[in-house]
Image: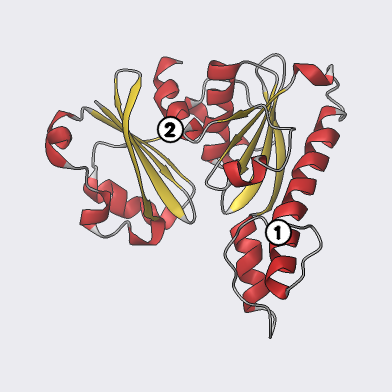
Amino acid sequence: MLLVIDVGNTSTAFGLFRGVRLVKTWRVATERLSDHQNISWRGSEGQRIREVRVASVVPKANKALKRQFPQAKFINYQDIGIKIKVKKPAEVGIDRLVDALAAVKLYGAPAIIVDFGTATTFDVVSAKSEYLGGAIAPGIMLSRDILHERTAKLPRIRIAAPRHVVGRSTVEALQSGLIFGYVAMVEGMIKRIKHSRYPLPVTRYKVIATGGLARLICKETDVIDIIDDNLTLYGLLLCQKN
């Protein structure tokens, strides 16, 4: 069995594959990775794991993972297997490259991948399956937390779509700005990408969303073609096939 680990700034996702079938997933807070109980697998499955593969964007978390999984392979851009057409490939978050690989292999190219994580990222794959780069914006939860921390009166709200765009309370106004504001950003960015200097017929792009808040945002727009909660985990599986 293959254990894959996607280490994000906020949470870490684990996936257990038997062949090409994803048989179990779970998450823990990245800040708790040093707790052995939080990163160990359950039951007897651990005895059958033959390989561990990690995509990490949090260097300080790697020490705990290496201690727990000394055989782990930490994926880098050279393991991705598609052309990376940016100036400094090593600077691109490995999760973004793994997502691009998964998009190509599972859904085809050209593609736009939107990942709703700690940051909201947009990544573009050409019709030739080349990773072209993308854009990075603050994530929804990060924006919410900053609004609360850097203002005197704005509360830390639950992220949910309000009934009306025009909020009738401070909480509703914050929810509207976060949810509908991010929907507008996603729609605008996808439109700009489709009409950028890599012109293709706009209908050819597959737009794929992933990340913890993808489903919440995508309910409010029709520009997303596919939602794949496990895109990065499958990308880590597919690294072995290049």
Residue farthest along the bottom direction in this orientation: 152
Q: Please give the residue where the numbered disc 1 appears in the rendered image.
A: 178
Q: Residue 87 occupies which quadrant of the picture?
A: top right
Q: Earlier in the sequence, mark 1 or mark 2?
A: 1
What is the crowding at mark 1: few (fewer than 14 residues within 10 Å), some, or many (at least 20)?
many
63 or 181, nearer to the observer: 181
Residue in the image at 65% along x and 41% along y: 219
Q: Secondary structure at mark 1?
A: helix
Q: Is residue 130 left or right of residue 105?
A: right
Residue 42 in the image: state x and y as whole percent: 19, 42
Amino acid type, mark 2: Leu
Residue 25 in the image: state x and y as whole percent: 34, 38
Q: Rounded to the nearest whole Å, what is the CA distance between mark 1 and mark 2?
A: 27 Å
Nearer to us: label 1 or label 2: 1
94 or 26, nearer to the observer: 26
Residue 47 in the image: state x and y as whole percent: 12, 33
Q: How many marks?
A: 2
Residue in the image at 75% along x and 61% along y: 177
- Determine whether 30 is above or below 25 in the image: below
Q: Secondary structure at mark 2?
A: helix
Residue 112 seen in the figure: yes
Residue in the image at 44% along x and 53% along y: 11
Mark on residue 233? 2
Residue 91 seen in the figure: no
- Determine whether 193 is above or below 239 in the image: below
Residue 5 in the image: state x and y as whole percent: 37, 40
Residue in the image at 73% along x and 51% along y: 182
Marks 1 and 2 in Cβ contact (< 8 Å): no
Amino acid type, mark 1: Leu
